[in-house]
């Protein structure tokens, strides 16, 4: 279902972007880098967080690491990763395929500045075997994301 919701999202909002599928799993940053032939930093991972009563998504470069202090300062509370079942229930995407496209219901989406190091990034596309290639600014524009600096940037 979620791969289809992502396909539908791009068909409506960006028909020039094609969902690519891999025969091997891309459920983790190292697997996705291998599956799509890119360096791990180009994998745009989507973090599903609860901060107080709010659920937000943060899209960040694959090699970056969330900085809890920066998140707390930016969003006014301590971040907690969503559990496996919660992620699927809230986003409509399974863990390993979570992305900001084709969500079950609208959520606040933020893009971390770590993505700006790349001309093209590769976020998941709703399943553990799918992704898209997209410029970071276009990704943010398509999903209405706000740019934030909440990660430690690592090479």
Image (spheres, helix red, strand yellow):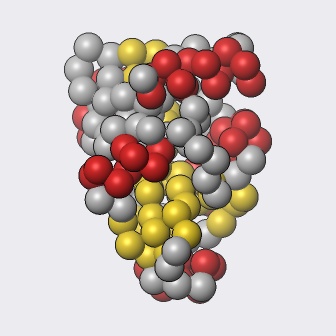
Give the vertical position of 36 relative to 49 (above or below). Answer: above
Question: Does residue 43 show up?
Answer: no
Residue at (44, 57) in percent of width and height: 48
Which quarter of the image is occupied by the N terminus?
top left
Give the vertical position of 133 relative to 140 (above or below). Answer: above
Q: Is residue 61 left or right of residue 16?
A: left
Residue at (55, 61) in percent of width and height: 56
Location of residue 33 by image quarter: top left
Residue at (44, 76) in percent of width and height: 79
Nearer to me, 155 or 100: 100
Give the vertical position of 84 relative to 8 (above or below). Answer: below
Q: Is residue 136 left or right of residue 55?
A: right
Nearer to me, 153 or 97: 97
Numbered disc total:
0
Residue 123 x %, y %: 49, 36
Residue 51 x %, y %: 50, 75
Which quarter of the image is occupied by the C terminus?
bottom left
Question: Does residue 2 show up?
Answer: yes
Residue 10 x %, y %: 65, 21
Residue at (49, 33) in percent of width and height: 122
Residue 50 x %, y %: 46, 69
């Amino acid at each position: 279902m979620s791969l289809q919701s992502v396909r539908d999202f791009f068909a409506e909002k960006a028909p020039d972007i094609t969902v690519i599928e891999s025969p091997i799993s891309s459920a983790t940053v190292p697997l996705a880098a291998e599956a799509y032939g890119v360096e791990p930093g180009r994998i745009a991972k989507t973090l599903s967080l609860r901060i107080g009563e709010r659920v937000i998504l943060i899209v960040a470069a694959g090699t970056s690491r969330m900085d809890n202090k920066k998140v707390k300062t930016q969003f006014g509370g301590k971040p907690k990763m969503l559990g496996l079942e919660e992620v699927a229930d809230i986003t409509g995407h399974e863990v390993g395929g979570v992305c900001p496209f084709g969500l079950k219901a609208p959520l606040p989406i933020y893009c971390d500045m770590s993505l700006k190091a790349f001309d093209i990034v590769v976020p998941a596309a709703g399943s553990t075997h799918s992704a898209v290639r997209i410029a970071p600014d276009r990704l943010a524009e398509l999903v209405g994301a706000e740019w934030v600096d909440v990660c430690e940037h690592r090479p």
